Amino acid sequence: MPELPEVEHAVRLLRGTVRGRTIVRAELLHPSLRRRMTAALVRSLAGARIAEVERRGKHQLIQLADGRVLRAHFRMTGDWTVQLVAEPLPRFARATFTLDDGRRLILEDSRALATLDLHPAGSPPVLGLGVEPMDDALTPEHLRAQLARRRGPIKAVLLDQRVIAGLGNIYVAEALWRAKISPRARASSLARPRLAALIAAIRAVIARATGSRYTEIGAARLNVYDREGLKCRRCGTPIRRIVQAGRSTYYCPGCQR
DNA sequence: GGTCGCCTGGTA
DNA sequence: TACCAGGCGACC
């Protein structure tokens, strides 16, 4: 489940249920995962203890006690499930990590786009991510500097993980709606007060979702995403859907300028 | 910057 | 049957 709050939710699950456990056996069930990690590397996970779990952007960094880092990225449809080894595997199980307590951690991913990568001890992943949305370092000045050299629309720039880490299509749409900024506005054209409003909107949207997932929030709490043709909750104008950079953008042409 | 491909499923 | 999908890296 892709965006930052969902990934944070996943990380908390891991901290609460698998941290401190030792992997007894790892298995990659889907060829697209096997292409990323050799069989020998997968076998080498047996005996590794999970020391800590961190999040950076939408990446999950599972720190092993031997210094290696198992990095997971859910992409579109990935998610974790923890179950007893006796239980039947779910339909879309793509990888399993059997633990030393009789349970196993399962990567469920219907579209099989999620990724798992193992980084050797001493060479942690270089992710190239921008500032975290909740970090104090995200200020209007910082954002303005980032956007100054961008020519594209603000929507596309906010999806760029090198600018701000963790935003995805839904929350970008929601944040722009909240800040009353058109997704088509040129990123470099936004003045400081609008950037301050945008930062506040991003934080509000993420804060509201943190600890849950958008699927659990329910569409009722989304203001623009997937609401094409429905009335804007703020001004009543029908929500419009356009395509930017090959992806759906929902916005209100009435109050997002 | 935009477009395509990765994979597979749900839905109109 | 066709289209759409919460991401992202490779490509022009």
Image (cartoon, coloured by chain):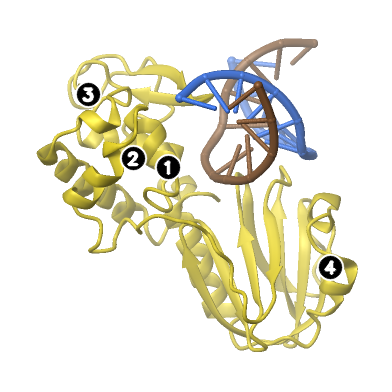
Chain colours: A yellow, B blue, C brown
Which residue is at a point 66% across and 64% down the rendered structure image?
A: A81
Q: Is residue A90 visible?
A: no
Q: Quadrant of the C terminus of chain A?
A: top left
Counting other residues with Cα less than 10 Å from the Cα at mark 3, is it few (<14), some (14-19), or many (20 or more)? some
Query: In the displayed structure, would residue A19 be above or below residue A31?
Result: below
User: Is the residue at mark 4 from the same chain as the one at mark 3?
Assistant: yes
Amino acid type at image mark 1: Gly
Residue A47 horizontal side relative to residue A251, left or right: right
Subunit bearing disc 4? A
Q: Is residue A118 above or below residue A164?
A: below
Disc 2 marks a residue whose amino acid type is: Arg
Residue neighbourhood size for the residue with mark 4, other residues' Cα within 10 Å, grouped as few (<14), some (14–19), many (≥20): some
**Image spot of residue A212 (x, y percent):** 42, 57
User: Which chain hosts label 2?
Assistant: A
Q: CA distance from mark 4 to mark 3?
A: 48 Å
Which residue matches tag 1?
A218
Is disc 1 surrounded by few (<14), some (14 to 19) or many (20+) residues within 10 Å?
Answer: few
Label at residue A256 = 3
Q: Is residue A91 left or right of residue A255?
A: right
Looking at the picture, tell me which residue is in the foreground, A76 or A208: A76
Q: Amino acid at mark 4?
A: Glu
